[in-house]
Image (tube, rainbow, N blue to C red):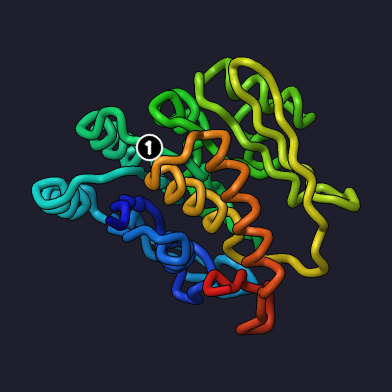
Amino acid sequence: MKPNILVIAGHDPSGGAGIHADIEAIQALGGFASTLITGLTVQNSQNVRGFRLTDIDLLQQQADALLDDMDYQAIKIGMTGSVVIIDFIVCLLKRLPGVPVILDPVLAAEAGGSLAQESLAEAMLEKLAPLCDVMTPNLPEAQALSGQTSVTDCGQTLVQRSGCATLVTGTHDDTDQVINHLFTAVGEEQWRWDRLPHSYHGSGCTLASSIACLRGRGQSLDSAVANGQAHVDRFLRGAFQPGQGQYVPNRQA
């Protein structure tokens, strides 16, 4: 049986990130994705120009319809956009106790441009992260959420404040290798990956959705985090450039 993965995220009309990326990654790893689209963005592979959030009443009706019909083995959360939507998601998660939740704390697109209203970071950390199993910020997101600077200080602060395991990705560093750090209550683990030659649109979405699907297939958190990174590395090695901006992971590779 394919695991059902509930994806709560925004729509990217260019197809590189957001809901498109989530569905493709989940299907590539053997899962089935249902979606709650939190907002419509105006963006392409070069930058974000704006966004408009989904009405809460409509999101609630969609969520009720899905939960009346389907069981879920994991949940992936991407763009939330506002404190109101975070409050909606918190209530929804409480209806699905015991289901693994992976949070990609989206605050901006890889190519630049905000995807969040002001005051979102604090609400995400205080309200949403404590209900999640792991969050997957890049370093700028980890710094914005924690108020710290170094990778170690960011990761340890986020775990202490939220109780949520935190995978801080090193995609925004200037090191020869991409170094990803997983912080938990019991310590830290690192993975090193070759730094590939391009910048990529949707890599964060792809990573969080890959981990969610593997958790939905029954893998432990450690295994899902390790294997999810390996799958993303494979997708990135086959990346292509559909427009004039960033490359897009080949999630069919």
Q: What residue is rendered at 40% in x and 58% in y?
A: 10
- Residue 18 appears left or right of 247: left
Instruction: Tell me where residue 97 appears, x and y as whole percent.
Output: 26, 28
Instruction: Tell me where residue 145 appears, x and y as whole percent.
Output: 59, 32
Residue holding disc 1: 83
- Looking at the rendering, which quadrant does residue 75 occupy? top left
Looking at this rendering, what residue extends furthest in the bottom direction?
Answer: 243
Q: What residue is rendered at 60% in x and 58% in y?
A: 231
Q: Nearer the viewer, residue 175 or 54?
A: 175
Q: Is residue 148 above or below residue 1?
A: above
Instruction: Tell me where residue 201 appears, x and y as whole percent.
Output: 62, 66
The amino acid on which the numbered mark 1 sits, given as a three-letter code, is Val
Q: Is residue 109 above or below residue 98?
A: below
Q: Nearer the viewer, residue 252 or 56?
A: 252
Q: What residue is rendered at 61% in x and 69% in y?
A: 249
Query: From this viewpoint, is residue 57 visible?
Result: no
- Residue 125 appears left or right of 182: left
